[in-house]
Amino acid sequence: MRIKTTRSLTFLILFFFGLLSLQAEDGYRLWLRYELVEDQETLKNYRQSASEIIVAPNSPTLSAVAQELERGLGQMLGKSIPLTEKVSRQGAVVAGTPQSSPLIRSLNIEDKLKEVGREGYLLLSARLQGKKVTVIAANTDTGVLYGSFHFLRLLQTRQSIHKLSLSSSPKTQHRILNHWDNLDRTVERGYAGFSLWDWHKLPDYTDPRYIDYARANASIGINGTVLTNVNANALVLTEDYLGKVAALADVFRPYGLKVYLTARFSAPMEIGGLETADPVDPRVQQWWKRKADEIYSHIPDFGGFLVKADSEGQPGPHNYGRTHAEGANMLADALAPHGGIVMWRTFVYSEEAPEDRAKQAYNEFKPLDGKFRDNVLLQVKNGAIDFQPREPFHPLFGAMPETPLMMEFQITQEYLGQGTHLVYLAPMWKEVLEADTYAEGKGSTVAEVVDGSLNDHPLTAMAGVANIGTDRNWTGHPFGQANWYAFGRLAWNPYLSSEEIAEEWIKMTFSNKPEVVQDIKEMMLNSHEAVVNYMTPLGLHHIMAWSHHYGPGPWVANKHRADWTSVYYHQADSAGIGFDRTASGSNAVAQYAPPLEEKFGSPEKVPEKYLLWFHHLPWDYKMKSGNTLWDEMALRYQQGVDTVRQMQQSWNSLEGQIDPERFQHVKTLLEIQEKEAEWWRDAVLLYFQTFSGKPLPEGVEKPTKTLDYFMQLNPKFVPGN
C-alpha cells in the first residue's frame, strides 16, 4: 500500500511539473529542474540504466529518497519510473543501507562503506540477482539521500552512469547556513525579500516551501541551518518560539538538516529574570542548563548555539570582566549532555577605536588557544575586516592549533553589489581556502585548518551567511543561486575547483549545450575580479557608503567610530594611499607566520592584489606593469567596467538559448551592474584625484558628473540595512 501511495504521489508530481514547464521559468526550482534529456541516444542509455527504483521507504528520509528519485528520473527520462520491492529488470536503481536493504546487504560492501563514514556514500555499478543495477549505498539514511542527489546530478549534467565506482564523504562535519533573519521577518544584509520563516503562522502552518528549502540544501550536502540573526533576539529561546522552531525542525529532519539558534548572551536577564548574565555565576550557569534541557525537549536533535558576543553592541562576557573562553564554555557545558555545539564568532573589536581593527580578533583570541571546551568551535570570517571584495586570509587561521576553527563565508553580497551585481564567489572563497598559512611549514593551507586535517581536530565546520529570502527565485539575482550552490559544494569538499562547481551549476540551471556552458562559465569566473577592480583594486578596502554599504563612499568620515569610516582604511593624502600594516605602521603583518610576515611586509614581494592592504605608498610608486600607482589604480577601475561590458555581450549572445524570462531578468541586471560599475569608477577616482592631483591616464573614460554630485547621492530604504 505504501508503494502505491508513493507511486500516486509521483504521478501528481510529474503532472504538476508538466504544467509548470508550460509556464514562465521563474527560477524557483533552483538547480533541481530535472529537465527532460534532449539527446535521444543519451535518453535511451539513461532509461536502460534507470528502469526501476528499489528503495525500502521505512523511514522519513528513505521516503524522501524514493520521492526524489521518482521525481528526478521521471522528469528527466520523460516517463514514470516504477518503485518496486525487488529487482525485476535490467538497470534498476537500488538505494539503501545494509540495515534497510537486504539487496545492499547482499553486496558485502561493508568494508567500503566504513571508509565513507556516517554521511558518505557509494555509487556503484553491480549485478544483483543476475541483472545489472546501479547501487546507491551508505551507512545511514542521510548518506543514501546525499548519494541519490549525486546520482541525479550525474544525469542532470549528462555524465555516463555506466561502470560507476564513486565514493564521496564530507570533509567538514557541520556545513551550516547562517540566516541573519529577524523575528519580524526582515533580513539583515538580505537582498531577496523577507525571511522564509513565517513565525506568525508557525507552528500550525508549515509552508510547503520549507520542504523545497530542505531539498535544495540536502542536494549540496548542507546539514545545518541557523534560523536567526547573530544580532540576536532572546525571544526565540522562549517557550512560544521553541514550539515554532520545533515545527521547522520536524520538516527539515528527513533531509538531514539540523536547526541551530543564536543565543543572546544577556538572555538570563531579558527572559530569565536574573540580574546578571555573568558566565561564572552558578545561577546563570544553571539557567542555561535548564534552557538547554527545555530546547532539547522540543527538538531532540537540536544542533546548538551560534553566538555573537562583545561585538557591535552585543552583550558578552567582557561586560563582567570574563574572557570569551569563559563565556563559550558556560554555554558548551549546558549543551554537552545533549551533544550540542557552540559556534563562537571571533568578529569582535574594542568599543574604543583601535590602532588597527584588523588586529583585534587575533589579539583577543590567540591567547585563549586550548582553553575552550571540546564542543566549541571558533567561527572566523575569511578575512580580518568584514567580508570585503578581497581580503588576505584571516591571521587566526593557523595561529590556534589547539582550537578548532570554522570558516565563515558571506554568501549574501553585502559588499559585493548586493542584489544587482553578478558576482560568482567561489573564486574568492578558493583564494582563501588555498592560501598557505605556513603554520606547520609550507603547504599548511587554510582548507586544512578548516577540515581539521592540519591539527587532527575531529570537530570541523563551515558556515555561510545565507542569501535566501521570499523572492520567488530564492536569491533575488538568478546568479545568486550559484553562490548558495557553491557554498554547499565547498563545505562538502573545499578542494573542488571553482570551474568544476560553476560547470555543474550551469548545466543543472540553464543548459547542457557546450557553447552555452562555456560562455556562462567564462562570465562567472571573471566576475569576481571585475567587481574587485571597479570597487576596491590593489588592496583597497571598506570604502563603501555609510551604513547600508550600497555604492561607493570613500569620503565617509567623522562618524562616532573611526573604524566605521572609509578614510580610516584608505588613509589617502597628498603623499599617497594605503594602510601601513608593516613594522613601521600597525605591524599587523606580525600576526602571520614569518615567511608571510616577510612577504606581506615588503611592497616588492607582496602580491599586488594586497598591496594597499599592507602598505601606504606614493601616488607615483612604480608598479610591476611599469605604470605609476595612480595610473594602475585608474586603469584597474576601467578594467572592471570593461569586464562587465564583456559579460553583457556574452549574455546577449545567448538570447534564444536561455528561457526568455530569466534571460531578460539577467540582461536587465547586467545593465544595472554596468551603470553601477561606472558609478564606482567615476566617484572613487574623482575623490582620490583630489589627493593625487594627477590626470586620468589614457584609456580611462572621463566622468560625466562632478565629485559633489556623487557625494550628495543618498539612496533611501536600501534593502538589507
Image (cartoon, rainbow, N blue to C red):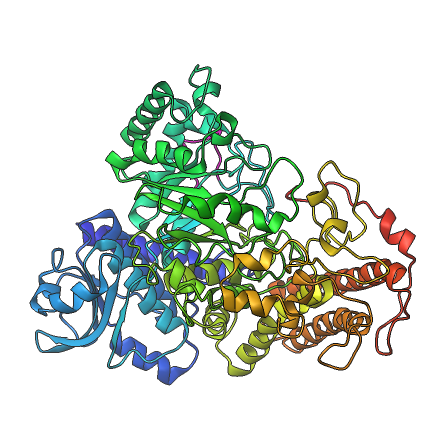
Q: Is the magenta stretch mostly helix, strand or loop?
A: loop
Residue furthest to the front: 584
| In the depicted structure, whether residue 628 falls above or below residue 555 | below
Q: Position of residue 177 (x, y in %)?
A: 45, 49
At 32% from the left and 50% from the top, the residue drawn is: 255
Q: Give the range drawn in magenta.
A: 197-207
Q: Where is residue 81 in the image (x, y as percent from the top left)?
A: 27, 66
Q: Specify whether 689 is left or right of 173.
A: right
| In the depicted structure, whether residue 288 falls above or below residue 516 | above
At 39% from the left and 60% from the top, the residue drawn is: 449
State the residue in front, 86 or 606. Answer: 606
At 17% from the left and 65% from the top, the residue drawn is: 113
Q: Position of residue 707 (x, y in %)?
A: 89, 56
At 71% from the left and 80% from the top, the residue drawn is: 624
Magenta stretch: includes residue 201: yes
The C terminus sits in image quarter: top right
**Number of marks:** 0
Q: Specify whether 586 is left or right of 277.
A: right
| In the depicted structure, whether residue 442 falls above or below residue 492 | below
Q: Classify residue 70 by image quadrant.
A: bottom left
State the residue in front, 196 or 239. Answer: 239
Magenta stretch: includes residue 385: no
